[in-house]
Image (spheres, rainbow, N blue to C red):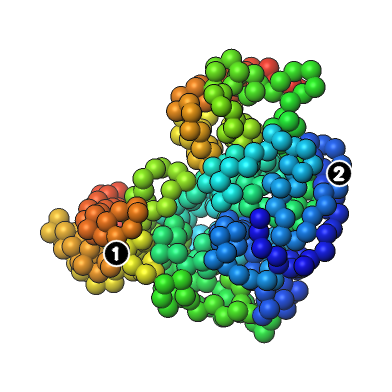
Amino acid sequence: MSLEKAIPVKINGVPHELLARANETLLDCLRQHGQFEVKNGCEKGDCGACAVQIEGEAVDSCLTLTWTVEGRSITTLEGLNDTNKPHPLIAAFMEQGAVQCGYCTPGIIVAAEEMLRETLNPTDDDIALALSGNLCRCTGYTKIFAAIRQAATVLREGGGND
Amino acid sequence: MLSEFDLEMPSDLQASLSSLPYATPLGGGTNLLVDLRARREKSKRLVWLGNIQAFREIKINAQQVSIGGGTTLSDILHSPAMAEAAPSLFNAARVFGGQMVRNRATVAGNICSGSPAADTVPPLLSLDATICLTNAEGCRSVPLDQFYTGFKTNLRRQDELITGLSWLVPNSNTANLFYKLARRKGDAISVVGVAVTVTREGDRCTHARIALGSVGPTVFRAKDAEAILAGGLLSEKLINDAAQKAMEQSKPIDDLRASANYRRHSVRVLTRRLITQAWHSLPEKTAHT
């Protein structure tokens, strides 16, 4: 059995140590750490419910071994919110009713946020590409697309947190 | 819960290579971790390749493309020059897995796992890619076309890594296309994947590649079909004959995604469509530079 190691990481900007053995995934460690916004779905990289960003890049935390993120910055859904104001994506999801059961939402917003840092004028193809690793079984994606378009508009007009 | 294993975290290529004889290389992990969880993969020792510097380098000049063994599918999509230098590979990257998988999965890993449905392999075969297999003693070049020996078996020895791949940039008289037929546009395993390369000199096709995925134990080139096109005066009949031959060379199986019959039919239709599209995208007059 491999030893448990303390892995220093930043979670949403705050330094922490995650205790993990070699075979433990970032998904399990983050949830043990109390990050319940990171959801456990399929555990094989199909559903995207466990998506987090590592150095700004969205990954499936169920397919990421904790040891491999030593020293890295991890951003979950909660890290996208300003303390005073929800992130424009989160606000848009609420306004557009893009949440039904909500299980897929944290992963979708994490994936969409990565795309919006590359382009604030996403086409529907861009959105589909960004969300290609996220499954929603409730809403049929129409409102999710609408929310992402709305968030892009808000951010284009300078309505972000900064 | 994953079964128990040890994880080595070497910081450079040499250290990784010295671990390899006793360990399974872990690249993006998008296949390996799924297989470990399903207990299909029973390795007790993994070696993480993510700390190797410059392993994700993409180099493109006027003649040649080379990419490092750690290059991810997202790295391909973030390289605007790749859309010109390897259109088929660029398009395969767009329909590969989902966004989070593309951010992690490596081209070399996709080649090594050896699935007949591997999306990057038909494009790379259509581009005549060569892979560099490296062990502690040095590197050997193997044409990708000779790499596979059977279903999920290949020439990589336990102590070797794919450290790089390279191919020649297609010239302006060459078109290179890929189409993935699948149940969805994203996050899907291919039903049939077809990549073609066609070089046009006037009315003559001087060079042809047809690579087929998900219709045999490995991805393979339909060489008899290529031979029908190469050197010939291209006509609708010639294209039909080549598409028919590609279908005859396919050996698909029935599975949950499609029947063998549907796959054979799709090979014929897609080969015909892609060759036709490639041909008409090329100038009739050869531009001599």
Q: Quadrant of the C terminus of chain B?
A: bottom left
- Mark 1 belongs to which amino acid? Pro
The residue most toward the top is: A95
- Mark 2 belongs to which amino acid? His
Name the foreground residue: B227 vs B37. Answer: B37
Q: Is mark 2 on a helix, strand or loop?
A: strand
Q: Residues within 10 Å of mark 1 (few under 14, many from 20)?
A: many
Q: Residues within 10 Å of mark 2 (few under 14, many from 20)?
A: some
Q: In this view, does B49 lie above or below A150?
A: below
Q: Quadrant of the N terminus of chain B?
A: bottom right
Name the foreground residue: B186 vs B7. Answer: B7
Q: In this view, does A58 lie above or below B21?
A: above
Viewed as shown, does residue B105 lie left or right of A84? left
Q: What residue does disc 1 label?
A: B252
Q: Where is residue A83 in the image (x, y as percent from the top left)?
A: 80, 22
Viewed as shown, does residue B32 lie left or right of B177? right
Residue at x 34%, y 52% (from the top left corner): B257
Q: Is mark 1 on a helix, strand or loop?
A: loop
Label 2 chain ID: A
* Marks 1, 2 in one chain: no
Residue at x 29%, y 72% (from the top left corner): B223
Q: Position of residue B69 (x, y in %)?
A: 60, 65
> What's the mark number on residue A16?
2
Whether residue B103 is visible here, answered yes or no, is: no
Q: Position of residue B139 (x, y in %)?
A: 61, 79
CA gap, disc 1 and disc 2? 51 Å
- The quadrant in which residue B100 appears is top right
Q: Position of residue B22 (x, y in %)?
A: 68, 78
Viewed as shown, does residue B193 lie left or right of A42? left
Label 1 chain ID: B
Whether residue B107 is visible here, answered yes or no, is: yes
